[in-house]
Amino acid sequence: MKRWLALLAAALLLSGCSNAAPSGSEDNIQTTLPQFPTLITTSLYDAQNPIEMDTNGAVRAYLPENGDDICIKPMGDNILLYGSGRIMRLRGDRLTEVATAEIPDLPEPDSGMLQIREDGIAYYDARENRIVFLNVLFREVGIFSLPEGIVGSVYLSRDWKAFYYCAEDGIHALDLDTGVNRLLKAQNALWQGISGGFMNGTVLRCSLLQEDGTEMTMLLSAQTGTVLAEGDYLKSLQGDGDCYYVQADNAHIFGISDQQPQKLLPDGKGKLYPLPESRGAVFVTKLEAGYCMDYYDIETGKRTAAVELTNIASIDGVYSAGGMVWFTSGGVLYRWNIKQSETEEQKTYTAAHYHYADPDEQGLAEIGQRLEKIQQQYGVTILFWDQVEGLAPWDYSFAAEYLTQPYTQSIPKLESALAKFPKEFFEEIAKWSGSGKVNIALVRGIYGGAETEKYASASGIQFFANGDAYIALALGEDIETWLCHELGHLLDSRILTTTNAYSQWSSLNPWDFKYDNDYEKNAERTDTKYLEGEKRHFVDFYSMSFAVEDRSRIFEYACMPGNEEVFASKYMQKKLKTVCDGIRKAFSLEDEGYIWEQYLQE
């Protein structure tokens, strides 16, 4: 499977942009003569605001109407101010009004249903089922009547040449020059809608609702309808021209055309405002009195500008237009001239971002070498990355981890867990299996199917395949704990099949207790009488689900530090001793002081 970012870039080559005026078929387009209004000379500039002096002229303040509900878009050399169905075209440093109009039900500029060009705007009028074209004075110069049966959101291309919509039979592409209407992608969902266009309109984002109620987000080629990528992370996709931003893998990822994706790593904690139209981003951090705004250039990875804003209570929105950064706060519009706040910092805040179809092969190879040494030291087999594909049992699925950082963070914890156990212990556990090794699979995620009545996700599972014993672990902070838990299941299998150590296990529980033998039912438990003080019989509620979970939880907690209180009651001591005796008997252990025996009271 090709990486979706490359597919985006490939789609970019399929078509370009044009600044031609709307033409369309004679049957659909109606033209009207523009009506020229009286020139407006009102300026929004707020000369009394002290912010200009506080920032040495880098930031200016303006006072628009409806200041609490506005956004900024470029319109040639001018600025388009949008808010609550009212649009204004502004020019110059003082933001002098050139034209203004009230348009009920005007779509949001970022919805894809309103497109702005230097010579005017075009928008989808859902009430009248048409596209309306306005000139630079916001006077109607044409309309395009649309077919009946449009469902959900739509997308108008930025060059005003194509209109994409959903109908009962699927997604349609309507050529506004010729009037040709073609089915781009047949309907294969309960509902679908178009939620955006990218790469100069050559890629569409489509949201689908499946028959089973699940939602899906995918990217389609605007020319062929081919599915280029799919995933929930695509909901965060933003783009302008050939630059895009997406939040995935808990990272801020930017890309330009077919270049290697970069993740932005700003300093500190704050909120990032991606500005793909300027190939930049603003990172806002809270100060004791006000905010700090840093501007990052995506192409260079440098923090090129910074400004401190005192006595500002909030940052409500950040935009880019005309080479400036615009932001709103408490109904006031501010313009930040980043060239007047330049830094000389040379540090780079970006790094290459890898994904499943294009991983860091060298980094993963180094991880493999490190795991090989651990395998030899502890007598286990450790599987990772693409080695886990097709390995999951029938009732689970694995997501392979392709980033090196989770391995780097988890491997020391894995080593710490393995070191708890006697030499050759793992080989003894699995000597009767096909390979004679315990197989440990390191994965990004473990997921259970709804039809199997498993949990939606798990941190670890233990299973057998082709006579071999496997433990699958999701990489993370608790990998040491979960290894001990799943190892407890392996030990439990050995003890049950080779000894009678657990034949009287039920007698160790209260007379009125029964295991749930059902994970969902177990999740509803609330009575804590057997989890506290001298009457404690169980580690936690989860231990009450199944007898095997009870014993594995005991082994898990027995192997970890700081659990003296868990095993303080005489009932927990009896259970712990039964588990410890079972392990000794099953594996013929004679040494003293095994880690899982640390809480036994003499």
Image (cartoon, helix red, strand yellow):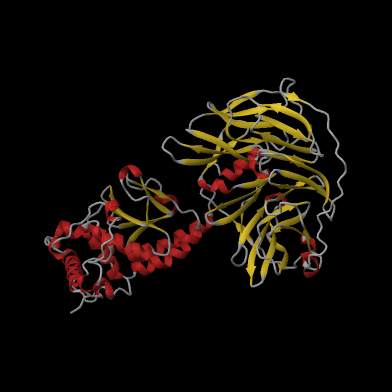
Q: In the figure, 168 relative to 159: above or below?
A: above
- Above or below residue 119? Residue 296 is below
The residue positioned farthest toward the top in the image shown:
27
* x and y percentages locating residue 433 in the rendered image: 24, 54
- Could one spot residue 1 in this view of the protein? no
Q: Position of residue 570 (x, y in %)?
A: 18, 74
Residue found 43% across the figure and 39% down from its top: 213
Quarter assignment of residue 126: top right
Examine the rendered structure and indicate whether residue 168 appears above or below residue 288. Answer: above
Q: Position of residue 429 (x, y in %)?
A: 24, 61
Task: Tell whether 353 sits left or right of 392.
Answer: right
Q: Nearer the viewer, residue 334 or 76?
A: 334
Quarter of the rendering containing residue 13: top right
The residue at 68%/67% (across/down) is: 292
**In this rendering, would 536 be left or right of 225?**
left
Residue 154 shows in the view: yes
* Quarter of the C terminus within the rendering: bottom left
Q: Residue at x 27, y 52 (%)?
A: 521
Q: Nearer the viewer, residue 450 or 420?
A: 450
